[in-house]
Image (cartoon, rainbow, N blue to C red):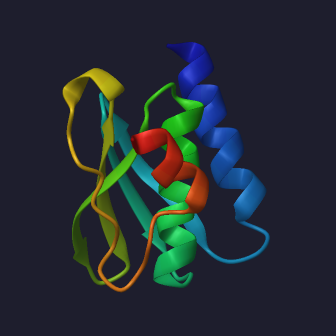
Amino acid sequence: MKKILLLTTISGLALSGCYSTQINMSMGNMRLITSSAAPQDVMDFATKTCKDDFYEGASFLSKAGKEYSFKCVKAEENEVLNPVPGTTLTATAKAEAK
């Protein structure tokens, strides 16, 4: 569990120099991300964060202002990965989702 939280923190810090993106909450498979970046960058960040935590990818749940809610999805859940409206899943995320 400590490794997962450490990876999540490091991922957030690595991207914070480019634009303001941070994970406000990481509980179980839910992620609350606050970002001023473009929606595609937020989707890519969420996907990478979930994959770093050993999930298949991130599925968009909702957006309120600059806060995005995502659910990290496991492969055995057979759940469709939903991108942020107006964005797409990256090519690697699509290939791994099949």
Q: Residue furthest top?
A: 1
How many marks can you see?
Answer: 0
Q: Classify residue 86 as left or right of residue 4.
A: left
Q: Position of residue 85 (x, y in %)?
A: 29, 80
Q: Position of residue 92 (x, y in %)?
A: 59, 51
Question: Closer to the camera, 46 or 83?
Answer: 83
Q: Is residue 98 above or below residue 19?
A: above
Q: In x, y percent, where is residue 67? A: 34, 71
Residue drawn at x 34%, y 66% is 83
**Among the 4 quarters of the image, the one containing residue 65:** bottom left
Q: Quadrant of the C terminus?
A: top left
Residue 81: percent from left, percent from top:
30, 52
**Above or below 26: residue 81:** below
Which residue sits at x=65%, y=32%?
A: 7
* Residue 95 versus residue 60 in the image, above or below: above
Give the residue at x 44% y 68%.
Answer: 34
In the rendered structure, the answer to whether residue 25 lies left or right of residue 36 reads left
* Residue depicted at 71% across the width and 41% down the height: 10
